[in-house]
Image (cartoon, rainbow, N blue to C red):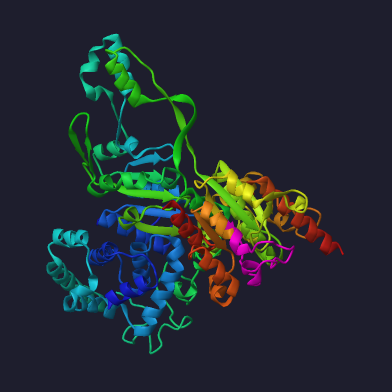
Amino acid sequence: MSEKFTGSKKYVATEDLMIAVNAAVTLEKPLLIKGEPGTGKTMLAEEMARALGKPLIEWHIKSTTKAAQGLYEYDAVARLRDSQLGDEKVNDISNYIVKGKLWETFLSEEQPILLIDEIDKADVEFPNDLLRELDRMEFFVYETKKLIKANNKPIIIITSNNEKELPDAFLRRCFFHYIAFPDKETMIEIINVHFPKIKKKLINEALECFFELREIPGLKKKPTTSELLDWIKLLVAEDIPPEALREKDTQKAIPKLYGALLKNEQDMHLFERLVFLSRRNSAN
Amino acid sequence: MLTKFFDDLRHADIPVSITEYLMLLRALEKNIITIDLDNFYYLARSCLIKDEKHFDRFDLVFSNYIEGNELTIEKILESIPLEWLENPDVLQLSEEEKKLIESLGGLEKLLEEFRKRLEEQTKKHKGGNKWIGTAGRSPFGSKGFNPEGVKIGDHQNGQKTAVKVWDRRVYKNLDENIELGTRNIKVALRQLRRLARHGIKDQLDLDNTISSTAKNGGFLDLKLEAEKTNSIKILLFLDVGGSMDPYIRLTEQLFSAAKSEFKYLEYYYFHNFIYESLWKDNSMRMNSRVPTTEIINTFNSNYKVFFVGDATMSPYEIGSVGGSVEHWNEEAGFTWISRMLKNFPKAVWLNPQPIQYWNSIQSITMVKEIFSERMFPLTTDGLANAVNVLRR
């Protein structure tokens, strides 16, 4: 293999992630990525495309997405309409075949990266319907009786949020990586990559707040890397001094701009109540 | 010896297949990693494990395997092909897998190739690559994989501490035997879905429209159909009070998940066991009771039924007339539950008590018997199994 993925200017890849990525690339198998929301699953594909200099094709999956839509769709209604109007186009069925993302990927001149994003959103049978296509990198268009083959076997990155169990037969064909929540050192690296000019002190204070917040029991949605980055972006933009984050036992114990970290009402209330309690305790 | 590792994994109930094993061997062959034990661990995990809930078990097996054998990575790799050649029957290949091996040029050839490759590799490594520990000394000592012992040099962004990744067992709380949150419950319950078309016909039925248009001589004849909805019907019977108090949160989660997942969901409460009446509202439990016969008559056998309770009580409460702790019951609990099970053949009992206590509590074994073993622990695994039984 010519080039290896070792992270990029904007993406810190841990050792285990690099091994999984490179193994998948070398053996031409799909790589399945799981992890808490906001730990950079989707970003991995984007950054891989940038680092390896390959085109990226994104296929975002919704609950209504069918596997066949990734291959092609036969627009029967348009053809029906044209036939009613006596349009010439109607005689050639290929005029009504709409190419899907997978077809697009197969046509690519150089080896592309295909991101199948949030595969667990689709129907339970969705991954099964793609088995052959991903295995052999070819499919058959029944309407035109043509076999479509990949020009270059794409690198396939699949992300999942664990909302559904994926079928075994599908898993067998993939490499798997679980993006664990980064520890403090990795987190500092990640922040440095995103905010190269940030003051050390602010990082430390912010991280302390952040990890404390994550440890509050009963939070519905724990803040993750992407929320932390948003928050720091705000802190930098508002030019908030590191000292302001530390005022733990004063009246202003709620960290500044924490709306970027907590995303739902119950969590906010829970947090405010805890802060209120701790303030009252320290007053006594 | 790597086959033994593979075997160990299977013994630990981790679903690994020969396909994945071959994938790992091919990955080793392709020289993706500079071979040291850490990288091997990551690669093996990525190839063999497909769900983070199994990471912890994988770590345990890996740790035991390495420790028990006092192995070095060299030893592991050198030993694979021999072991394989000596008793390839160990592998128990399926037809499909055999074909796969054939397509790779036959097992023998594959192994031969692999062995050659490995020999080259060991030589290369002895030549220069930096191994764990210092050169010349065995990196692992006699009890080398003491969690605190091995120091790993030359890492750019890997481990900061000397404790091995697999011995840290960071994935401990992802094991599926822990109790579940609503999300997991919903996913498990969703397996029960039966989609059927109900209600107003407001979606275009394309296939039907096309064929009837064709029949109509090419003039449009629109056909509509109703939207697909989940038509499964669920009955929940929940034990409340007394010994169930510690499990209230768990039961709540199950209840809320079920409520949002099913359109046809009915629920009733009971205390300890089923007798002649149940209730729907805990604050009114003394005043507004529903006779059990009424429930049996109202709902038909299409309903799938979950009983949720710890089934922990005195055996009299199940077997005897007048055994209830709350009132005088004219008929034994056993009689009532039998009536219900007769009417609802699709029924399971979910028990929040940890499974290891079941055999030591007499009433649990009794209930289990009444339910012909269809009692499951209230965990993700248990719920999935229960759902499987109900789907049959």
Residue B247: % across, % down: 65, 63
Is B78 or A167 nearer to us in this picture?
A167
Q: Farthest residue toward the right?
A: A284
Picture residue at 22% right of the left edge, 47% below the top: A136
B115 over A1 or under it: above or below: below
Relative to residue A94, is residue A6 depicted above or below? below
Which residue sits furthest top?
Answer: A85
Q: Residue at x 36, y 49 (%)?
A: A157
Residue A274 pos. (x, y %): 75, 57
What range is drawn magenta here? B307-336
Residue B39 place in picture, x, y as percent:
35, 69
Write down the quadrant of residue B205 in the picture.
top left
Relative to B191, say whether B154 is above or below: below
Task: Specify whether residue B306 is painted magenta.
Answer: no
Quarter of the image that includes the N terminus of chain B:
bottom left
Q: Nearer the viewer, residue B82 or B215?
A: B215
Q: For this view, does A83 lie left or right of residue B150?
A: left
Left or right position of A181 against A68: right
- Please tell me which residue is depicted at 16% across the width and 70% down the height of the picture: B111
- Is residue B318 part of the magenta span, yes or no? yes
